């Protein structure tokens, strides 16, 4: 199956230069990293990352290089949700890894695997079962233009729009592209 952008939602919103609000039971700041522990909640705009622990690795200029979330990881933004035991976003390689009962939902669509890796630079998605099966739920949606066209054809033939044929378009978790390997 073909996927495009399924994991753009995961952690990317928290990595850019907009303000981020962080809450946790504790915060440790070291030379090259921030470590949030205990009921961590990071918010940027309408994107929210929750986890037991989040480590943000930073470079000498104070820019984030990698974000690592561990334990009960949940990322949400409008219309999208990702869940895993572990999540990592490497800003240099633009690679996102979800590990441990990884699940990504976008509207009615879903992908589940033990590990989901998304290479943003190369637009490549790999879902790995690692002894389990990879599972997807793919909901076809009708394309508005095609439906209107078919409804017009049906009405000309004497059918009501509900009785006429409908050609379904496809949409999976951010509209086609990339690849799926299991």
Image (cartoon, helix red, strand yellow):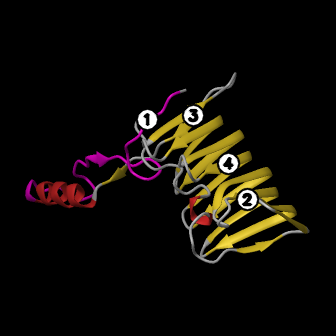
Quadrant (top left, top right, bottom left, bottom right) of the N terminus: top left
Q: Quadrant of residue 42?
A: bottom right
Nearest the viewer among 141 and 154 is: 141
Mark 1–mark 2 Cα distance, whole angstroms, equals: 29 Å
The residue carrying mark 3 is 127
Q: Residue 181, percent across and down?
A: 50, 28
CB-based contact (under 8 Å), mark 4 and mark 1: no
> On residue 88, which mark appears?
4
Mark 2–mark 4 Cα distance, whole angstroms, equals: 10 Å
Mark 3–mark 1 Cα distance, whole angstroms, equals: 9 Å
Which label's residue is closer to the chain start, 3 or 2? 2
Q: Nearer the viewer, mark 3 or mark 2?
A: 2
Mark 3–mark 2 Cα distance, whole angstroms, equals: 25 Å
CB-based contact (under 8 Å), mark 1 and mark 2: no
Report crowding for label 4: few under 14, some 14 to 19, many 20 or more residues within 10 A (C-alpha). Answer: many
Please state if 119 lies on the left or on the right of 85 as rendered: left
The residue carrying mark 2 is 56
Which label's residue is closer to the chain start, 4 or 3? 4
The residue carrying mark 1 is 179
Q: Is residue 97 above or below residue 58?
A: above
Q: Which residues are magenta?
A: 156-181
Q: Nearer the viewer, mark 4 or mark 3?
A: 4
Nearest the viewer among 21 and 4 is: 21
């Amino acid at each position: 199956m073909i996927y495009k952008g399924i994991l753009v939602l995961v952690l990317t919103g928290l990595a850019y230069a907009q303000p981020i609000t962080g809450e946790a039971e504790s915060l440790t700041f070291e030379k090259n990293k921030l470590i949030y522990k205990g009921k961590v909640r990071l918010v940027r705009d309408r994107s929210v990352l929750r986890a037991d622990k989040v480590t943000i690795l930073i470079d000498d200029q104070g820019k984030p290089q990698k974000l690592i979330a561990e334990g009960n990881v949940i990322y949400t933004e409008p219309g999208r949700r990702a869940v895993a035991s572990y999540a990592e976003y490497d800003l240099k390689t633009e690679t996102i890894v979800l590990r441990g009962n990884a699940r990504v939902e976008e509207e009615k669509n879903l992908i589940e695997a033990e590990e989901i890796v998304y290479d943003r630079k190369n637009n490549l998605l790999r879902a790995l079962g690692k002894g389990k099966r990879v599972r997807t739920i793919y909901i076809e949606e009708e394309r508005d233009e095609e439906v209107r066209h078919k409804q017009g054809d049906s009405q000309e033939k004497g059918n009501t729009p509900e009785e006429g044929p409908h050609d379904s378009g496809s949409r999976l978790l951010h509209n086609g592209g990339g690849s799926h390997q299991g």
